[in-house]
Image (cartoon, rainbow, N blue to C red):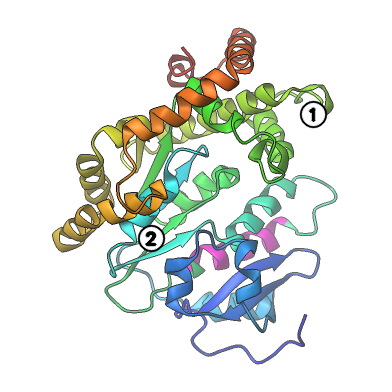
Amino acid sequence: MAAQLQLPADIGSNPGWLIHDFQAMFRRFAVAQVSESLYRESAFMNNAINPQLGKIMPVGLAPMQAAFQSAAPVPVPAPYIFHIGHCGSTLVSRALGASGDILPVREPRLLIAVSDCLRDLQDPLSWLSASEYRAMERVALLAMERQFHDAQLPVVKLTSTCNNLVDAVLDQHPDRKALFLYQPLEPALAGILRTQQKPTSDLRVQAQYRLMDWSEVSGQQPPRLTELRAEQIAVISWLGNMTRMSHAIERYPQRILPMNFEQFLQDPAGKLERICTHFSLRDPVQETVIKGFASVARNYSKDPRRAFTAADRQAILNKSRQLFSSQIKAGLEYAQSLLATHQLPARVSELTE
């Protein structure tokens, strides 16, 4: 990494200075200069964009904290999109990003680092003290509020392993709103199991995080990862995420909008209007988002001649149901066994049927 340079004067307000990552062991951020187009064109702002970043500038926690110390309060805080994975969050983020007044921030690597540090915080092996973590978390959340122009509103879509940040995100600003995208367990299993053989499958890459989150929300030690089959990991992941977010919805009933992705696809225009209203987006922005959805859905379908529809979604899931019927059945049975031994929210139980 390059030698530490002088901190840019506008780093606290200009998202062109991408605060890309945080290295806990060195207590420093990684900063790169980027364009607005990188935000708009990148599928995700995680490590996938590393080859496009060019020169990286390391900035210590203390000077970065000082740069954000006098950050002006934002009139409208950035809304967040939480989700359980494979349920249309990228589609919704791209739809909102059709408006130039929305800055889409999809799965930023910085908030993945914050999420990881939060998991480690109670561990004696954590590199950060509680006060250092709070300082780092504050900088990271304030960094998400920055705009390329005054009328712009960032909308942050987290990766599904970052759902442990829901309280921090909502407590950071009393007016912040969030969307929670989910799907019932059976289609969730059909969706995730079709990717299980890929090296990048969530079942492999995120399995340890999923078990840690399940342990936190259930209050029990998780099973050993080596003893779990793919469908059992998928069930634990779904139950952990749904339980955490169900509790959050109970705490913030007016601020989190839960939405079933299967129902979203039945009425995209109506559901996008509801999301825009929840996020307090102005009428011109709503109109642009809804009108631009057809183009976004065509890209999502990977067929420029037609938009992605609920029928396409069902065709994908039905193929998976045929290929992985025994695993899906075993997963649903495993879920019922966990529900019988764990006290989980009624909302979660209803969606396993």
The amino acid type of the residue labelled 2 equals Ala
Residue 46 can be seen, yes or no: yes
Judged left or right of residue 150, residue 215 is: right
Residue 78, numbered label = 2
> In the rendered image, which residue does mark 1 sit on?
225
Residue 144 in picture, x, y percent from top left: 47, 66
Write down the region rendered in magenta: 130-142
Structural crowding at the residue carrying mark 2, measured as other residues with C-alpha within 10 Å and reported as few (<14), some (14–19) or many (≥20): many
Is 137 included in the stretch rendered in magenta?
A: yes
Quarter of the rendering containing residue 195: top right
Structural crowding at the residue carrying mark 1, measured as other residues with C-alpha within 10 Å and reported as few (<14), some (14–19) or many (≥20): few
Disc 1 element = helix
Judged left or right of residue 48, residue 176 is: left
The residue under the point 70% across, 35% down is 197
The residue under the point 62% across, 13% down is 326
User: Considering the image in quadrants, where does the N terminus appear?
Assistant: bottom right
Residue 176 can be seen, yes or no: no
Vertically, is 137 above or below 165? below
Residues marked 2 and 1 touching at CB (< 8 Å): no
Is 233 included in the stretch rendered in magenta?
A: no
